[in-house]
Image: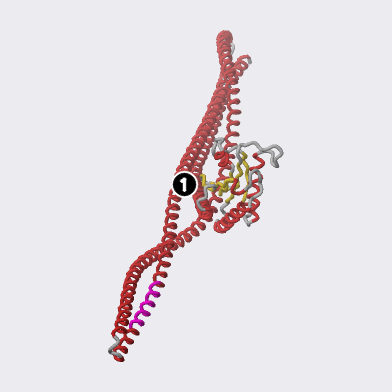
């Protein structure tokens, strides 16, 4: 019985290595899962870096589009200057044509008058010749009378010759006028042909503008769809970021668990080593005692007892082998499950990488289309702004107190307001009424989807306000003037949602000097056509 107890205790000590091996296998599995999550984090970092690079490329494309837009603005200004010069030439040609036409009418009237005088002189000459013939037939002896009549006839002939010279000169003048008229008619024909060509180009431009409006409407729909898709993508990216944060928290928790398990494994390993040493020492002592007892009991022990002991030892070994095989099978199943999980994680990572590339391509395409649509809208607004400035320039002429500074029309305050007042003068109301008509015509041409705005900026100089004045500061005065201009424009028919009044006081001077001319330049009202 003592031998059986010792063998049972020895079998219990043999289970510790299997337990430690299972813990080591579990530690390896946990480290492998941690490696998978670290790789997933690395892939996510690469995807985010790719997205940042795509955003950098989009910013570079936006900068290139801005440069192209600046070049197009310069080209548009040159074309407008050429068109203005052509219009000036047409006006000069029309004035020359009117002058030549008036000269031709005067020359024709002079020719008719001289022709009448020539006919009158010829009639007098014929009448005198007939009278002379009658006198010659009636009286042959009136020499003195005949001489007088001959003198009258010679005088009449001289008058006729003088009239003939005048007629010849008139004919020459008429010939020269005819040549000038022919040249003028040719110039007028060329002007009419050029005007027809310009009208044709204008018609083509209107057709192109209509086509551009339709394309812009389509692009705006695409931009809205792209913005919706971009918002969805941003939501997905936010969800992905949240998922990454959650995974990071899980990984950190598992790292903490792994650290705890590592401490436990080290403690168990130390305990196992100690138990193994104790077991080896106990086994050595037991073996010595067994040899001593076996020597003492050899005489009394029978063959049947030794056979039973051998059978029990064989059964115990079979049980231990079966337990080891069960543990090996369990570990094999766990390894297969881990491999399957690794395959699923790999497939999920591949799918996420493919989806990330697709989304990156979609974002790049949407960004390109969005930039193109924005550039088209900016160009269209710039075209209407140039048209607005051109009409205002034609309306106001070359006045020194009204000028263009950048994208603004600048009116000196003296043009619109009396000194120190925010009440519009009669001349100012008249000019603003004409500007309102131009804006109404332009507003009818601008598409409704272009969100334009007319900004009225009020500025003042830095001269201190007199004590007791209606407005306490220059800022209040500039605000009141901007509001007065805005109210007049709205009263003339401009929509209130398209007009904005702003005031800057003396904070944005055009000229930093203190001379009267510099202060006058800083007192101004600026009109700017822009988008919201």
Residue stretch in magenta: 110-125
Relative to residue 437, is residue 153 depicted above or below? Answer: below
99 relative to 27 in the view: left or right: left
Q: Can residue 314 be seen in this view?
A: no
Coloring applied to the structure? secondary structure
Residue 415 falls inside the magenta stretch: no
Crowd class of label 1 (few under 14; some 14 to 19; many from 20; radius 10 Å): some
Give the secondary structure at mark 1.
helix
Return the residue nearer the eye: 237 or 474.
474
| Residue 270: quarter of image | top right
Q: Nearer the viewer, residue 471 or 406?
A: 471
Residue 164 image offset from top left, x and y in percent: 32, 74
Residue farthest to the bottom, as pictured: 138
The residue wearing badge 1 is 69
- The residue depicted at 56 percent of the width and 51 percent of the height is 224
Q: In which quarter of the image is the N terminus?
A: top right
Q: Would you say the magenta stretch is mainly helix, strand or loop?
A: helix
Would you identify the image quadrant in which residue 314 lies?
Answer: top right
The image position of residue 352, as x and y in percent, is 51, 41
Decide which of 32, 350 is in the foreground and name it.
350
Seen in the picture, residue 161 relative to 269 is either above or below; the reply is below
Whether residue 177 is visible to the viewer of this picture, yes or no, is yes
Q: Position of residue 69 (x, y in %)?
A: 46, 46
Q: x, y (%) of residue 109?
A: 41, 72
Front one among 199 and 429: 429
């Amino acid at each position: 019985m003592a031998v059986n107890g010792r063998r049972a205790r020895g079998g219990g000590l043999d289970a510790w290595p299997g337990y430690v091996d299972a813990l080591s296998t579990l530690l390896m599995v946990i480290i492998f899962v941690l490696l998978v999550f670290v790789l997933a984090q690395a892939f996510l970092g690469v995807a985010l870096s790719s997205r940042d690079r795509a955003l950098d490329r989009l910013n570079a494309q936006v900068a290139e589009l801005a440069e192209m837009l600046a070049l197009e603005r310069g080209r548009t200004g040159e074309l407008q200057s050429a068109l203005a010069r052509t219009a000036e030439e047409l006006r000069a040609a029309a004035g020359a044509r009117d002058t030549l036409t008036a000269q031709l009418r005067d020359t024709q009237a002079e020719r008719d008058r001289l022709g009448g005088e020539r006919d009158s002189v010829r009639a007098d000459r014929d009448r005198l010749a007939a009278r002379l013939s009658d006198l010659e037939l009636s009286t042959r002896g009136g020499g003195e009378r005949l001489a007088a009549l001959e003198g009258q006839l010679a005088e009449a002939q001289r008058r006729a010759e003088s009239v003939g010279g005048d007629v010849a000169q008139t004919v020459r003048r008429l010939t020269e006028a005819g040549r000038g008229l022919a040249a003028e008619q040719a110039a007028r024909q060329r002007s009419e042909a050029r005007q027809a060509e310009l009208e044709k180009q204008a018609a083509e431009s209107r057709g192109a503008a209509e086509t551009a409006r339709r394309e812009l409407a389509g692009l705006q729909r695409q931009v809205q769809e792209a913005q919706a898709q971009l918002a969805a993508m941003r939501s997905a990216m936010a969800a992905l970021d949240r998922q990454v944060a959650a995974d990071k928290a899980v990984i950190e928790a598992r790292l903490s668990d792994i650290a705890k398990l590592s401490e436990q494994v080290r403690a168990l390993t130390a305990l196992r080593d100690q138990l193994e040493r104790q077991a080896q020492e106990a086994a050595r002592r037991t073996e010595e005692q067994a040899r001593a007892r076996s020597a003492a009991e050899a005489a009394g022990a029978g063959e049947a007892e030794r056979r039973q002991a051998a059978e029990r030892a064989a059964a115990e070994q079979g049980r231990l082998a079966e337990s080891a095989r069960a543990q090996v099978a369990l570990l094999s199943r766990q390894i297969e499950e881990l491999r399957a999980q690794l395959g699923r994680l790999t497939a999920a990572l591949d799918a996420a990488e493919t989806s990330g590339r697709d989304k990156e391509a979609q974002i790049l395409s949407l960004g390109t289309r969005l930039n193109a649509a924005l550039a088209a809208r900016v160009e269209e607004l710039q075209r209407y702004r140039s048209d607005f400035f051109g009409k205002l320039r034609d309306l106001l002429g070359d006045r020194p107190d009204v000028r263009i500074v950048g994208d603004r029309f600048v009116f000196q305050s003296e043009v619109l307001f009396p000194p120190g007042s925010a009440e519009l003068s009669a001349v100012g109301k008249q000019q603003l009424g004409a500007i309102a008509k131009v804006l109404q015509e332009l507003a009818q041409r601008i598409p409704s989807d272009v969100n334009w705005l007319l900004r009225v900026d009020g500025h003042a100089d830095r001269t201190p306000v007199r004590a007791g004045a209606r407005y306490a500061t220059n800022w209040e005065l500039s605000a009141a003037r901007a509001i007065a201009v805005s109210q007049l424009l709205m009263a003339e028919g401009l929509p209130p949602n398209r007009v904005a009044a702003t005031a800057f006081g003396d904070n944005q001077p055009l000229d930093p000097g203190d001379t009267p001319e510099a202060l006058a330049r800083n007192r101004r009202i600026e009109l700017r056509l822009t988008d919201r």
